[in-house]
Image (cartoon, rainbow, N blue to C red):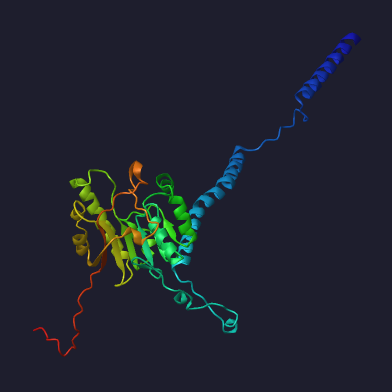
Amino acid sequence: MKTQIMTKIKKKNNQRNGEDTTRQGTGCCWSEKETSPSLSPSLFRWLGLLVQLAIWLPLLLILKVTPLYLHVKAKESYKKIFLEEEVTYNDDDDEDTDYDEDKEEEQPEKWRGHYSSRHTMLLVGEGDFSFSLSLARAFGSAHNMVATTIDTEENIKKKYRNGVANVRELEERGCLVLYGVDAKEMSQHFFLRTQRFDRIVYNFPHVGFLYHEGSYRQIQLNKGLIKGFLSNSRALLKGDNGEIHVTHKEGDPYDKWDLVKTAEKLGLVMYKTVPFNKNDYPGYKNKRAHGKLSDAPFPLGDCSTYKFKLKCLPKFPQHSKSEVPELK
């Protein structure tokens, strides 16, 4: 009897020792009745969403705000060049300010060719920017000039050996250089459409050597370029005294571009034509601007600068009411 009781006690002790070893082996520190702590799946999902918002929300704000900020800054820099900034004065500070209202008028007027340092100028279709630079050097400053090209900045580097250096000097002298400006759509440019110019200049407009120079297709393409340029320039002229200058080669097939007729249909009048002399603009180098020979010059031959103005409507005399007959 004692032996049976002793064997039962030993079995119970062995079972208890076995449970303790299994608990120690699994590394658990709670009893069988205790339950392991757990988090609900919904809580995990909410935490994941919060983490994603914390990561993506700042990135979205940066992507949305940065282009707007750069656009505003660009407009502000353009306005500093071409728009007069308002200056406020206090009566107490008059003696301390050195602002001179007639500072610009005191600067001597300088000329090169048909152009003055007091003209606000838009130069269209620049090649290596040597024409713009010739004017800037003559004026001593280029704050009155905007020079544009249809090329990108990268294309200027590839096409013209001195293009980058010319642009750098122009910008140092205060010129605003704009890339990717199409002469046929420039009146819709976000900055140009806010400006008006005394002189708009396009030297040797040409669409590129797509076909033979005298072919019908080539002539039609160049006529379209002329029409688009004149139409857009008309919208950017400053008052009745503004002028559009187009330097153009004479003779066949260039006479077939109908430069003067196209201008008249658009409400412009040609008031003067003068022979173009390249020597009047030291440093200017005419360029083909298209294809592998972009940096090469082309023969000028006989060429002229055509000057256009807005066609003024006739002013009819005003009559008093008593002089106007009544309709019956």
The image shows residue 82 at horizontal and vertical percentages of: 44, 67
Can residue 161 be seen by looking at this rendering?
yes
Residue at 16% across, 90% down? 322
The image shows residue 169 at horizontal and vertical percentages of: 47, 57
Q: Pick out the residue farthest to the front.
A: 279
Viewer-nearest residue: 108 or 29 = 108
In the displayed structure, 85 sits above or below 277; it is below
Q: In which quarter of the image is the C terminus?
A: bottom left
The image shows residue 125 at horizontal and vertical percentages of: 34, 55
In the displayed structure, 284 sits above or below 309; it is above
Q: Pick out the residue farthest to the bottom.
A: 322
Q: In which quarter of the image is the N terminus?
A: top right
The image shows residue 60 at horizontal and vertical percentages of: 52, 49
Quadrant of res 211: top left
* Residue 85 left/right relative to 184: right
| Number of disc labels | 0
Q: Pick out the residue farthest to the right.
A: 2
Viewer-nearest residue: 57 or 248 = 248
Residue at 85% across, 17% down? 13
* Residue 258 left/right relative to 292: left
Quadrant of res 108: bottom left
Quadrant of res 175: bottom left
In the displayed structure, 117 sits above or below 71; it is below
Viewer-nearest residue: 217 or 63 = 217
Residue at 38% across, 49% down? 151
Can residue 71 be seen by looking at this rendering?
no
